[in-house]
Image (tube, grey):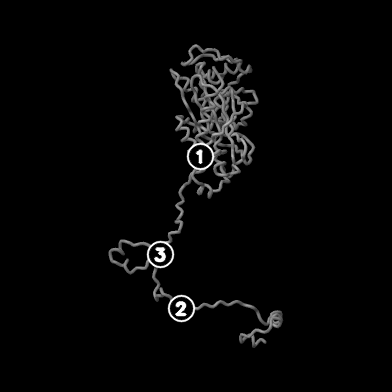
């Protein structure tokens, strides 16, 4: 049998298994190739050209040269250029909408603010639960500021303690009474001087309004901002310790709640949100205040998309505005609409160190506006 195997004749399967057990034979695979001359056979190796050079044009060698065929389906080499983050794309769309509506962008490049501008100027009491709602990050070094306008600080202190504005400004020289009782608690300057990471961009809004109130003659204004804020919140799929706030405000004479609702509806209509509803709520520095809801056809329910209200007289009058000046404002986050637009469920997949760089490179162009007949938040 072994001689037969050597000659290419295989025994029966049962006999072959016995030979394998006795290790007299072993199975092996052998590959054989048959090589023949093809149409492009050459005894010398030549490299195919990829481009026609100036030398080839000069000596005429391009006529007989062999060129490599082009692969028009190839993707090409990645240039490694930078890409815009989805948040930046959505932010650009929101910014263009504000500019189309005639709003002026506020300078919000400063993350560190004082408690005075972040809380006290907004008429938030120093010893009230409303102040704890922000869950603030306080700065250790430097822990306090030395730059607070003294005349404005005196007005704020008087408004907090007794509800009266100490002195009037250029636009309200008679300093008509506010008609408030204040908080009726002592106001501590040391508390107002504490430095912190701003919990909302309304701190910048207060500074812009106070600056506007110092002008000799009142002029209406519309401001907006889109920037980062910080809060000491529990991290989960929808909350981070830092996020982006979108804020818009209008200051003019004799503004009403109807002006606020109409402005908000016009703003969200440019986002493709036409089914808007309002619900009364509480905000520390606006009265009246309203939550903004939009019908989401995908979720088949009303979804909160923002918050709004009218700044309290206790906030505006110490700045120097006259009695008939009102300010309407609204705000929303940048992350929530971005997550809806790009179908992201976890905010940590959108912002932070766990973001997929491939997603950043391949995310599509953002378009906020949609057909008016469609009920979508995108």
Residue 14 at x, y percent in the picture = 71, 81
Q: Mark 2 points at which residue?
A: 36
Q: Residues within 10 Å of mark 1 (few under 14, many from 20)?
A: few
Q: Name the residue under label 3.
A: 69
Which mark sits nearer the N-terminus, 3 or 2?
A: 2
Residue 303 pos. (x, y %): 60, 35
Vertically, is 366 above or below 36?
A: above
Number of residues whose C-alpha sits closer than 10 Å to that of mark 3, classed few (under 14), some (14–19) or many (20 or more): few
Check contact, mark 1 vs mark 3: CB within 8 A: no
x, y percentage for residue 10? 65, 84
Q: Quadrant of the N terminus?
A: bottom right
**What residue is pinned by disc 1?**
371
Cα separation between marks 1 and 2: 65 Å
For residue 146, say whether it is visible: no
Q: Do the residues labelled 3 and 2 touch (CB within 8 Å)?
A: no
Residue at the bottom extreme of this rendering: 3
Q: In this view, does 55 lie to the left or right of 356?
A: left
Q: In which quarter of the image is residue 112?
A: top right
Tell me what residue is drawn at x 46 percent, y 25 percent. Answer: 221
Residue 225 or residue 235, whichever sits in front? 225
Give the structural element (helix, strand or loop) at label 2. loop
């Amino acid at each position: 049998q072994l001689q037969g195997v050597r000659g290419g004749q295989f025994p029966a399967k049962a006999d072959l298994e016995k030979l394998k057990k006795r290790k007299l034979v072993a199975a092996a695979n052998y590959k054989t190739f048959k090589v023949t001359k093809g149409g492009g056979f050459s005894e010398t190796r030549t490299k195919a050209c990829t481009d026609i050079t100036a030398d080839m044009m000069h000596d005429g060698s391009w006529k007989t040269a062999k060129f490599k065929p082009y692969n028009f389906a190839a993707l090409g080499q990645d240039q490694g250029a930078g890409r815009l983050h989805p948040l930046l794309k959505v932010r650009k769309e929101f910014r263009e909408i504000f500019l189309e509506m005639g709003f002026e962008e506020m300078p919000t490049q400063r993350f560190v603010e004082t408690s005075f501008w972040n809380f006290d100027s907004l008429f938030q009491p120093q010893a009230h639960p409303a102040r704890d709602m922000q869950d603030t990050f306080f700065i250790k070094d430097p822990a306090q500021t030395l730059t607070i306008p003294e005349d404005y600080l005196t007005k704020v202190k008087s408004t907090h303690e007794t509800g009266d504005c100490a002195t009037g400004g250029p636009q309200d020289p008679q300093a008509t009474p506010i008609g408030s009782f204040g908080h009726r608690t002592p106001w501590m300057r040391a508390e107002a001087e504490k430095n912190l990471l701003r919990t909302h961009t309304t701190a910048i809004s207060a500074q812009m309004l106070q600056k506007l109130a110092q002008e000799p003659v009142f002029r209406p204004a519309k401001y907006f901002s889109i920037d980062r804020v910080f809060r000491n919140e529990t991290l989960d799929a929808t909350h981070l310790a830092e996020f982006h706030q979108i804020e818009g405000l209008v200051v003019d004479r004799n503004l009403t709640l109807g002006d606020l609702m109409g402005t908000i509806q016009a703003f969200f209509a440019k986002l493709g949100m036409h089914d808007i509803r309002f619900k009364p709520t509480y905000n520390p520095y606006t009265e009246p205040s309203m939550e903004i809801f939009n019908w989401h056809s995908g979720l088949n329910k009303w979804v909160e998309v923002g918050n709004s209200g009218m700044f309290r007289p206790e906030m505006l009058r110490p700045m120097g505005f006259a009695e008939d000046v009102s300010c309407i404002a609204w705000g929303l986050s940048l992350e929530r609409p971005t997550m809806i637009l790009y179908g992201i469920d976890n905010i940590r997949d959108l912002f932070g160190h766990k973001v997929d760089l491939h997603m950043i490179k391949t995310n599509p162009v953002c378009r906020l506006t949609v057909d008016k007949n469609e009920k979508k938040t995108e």
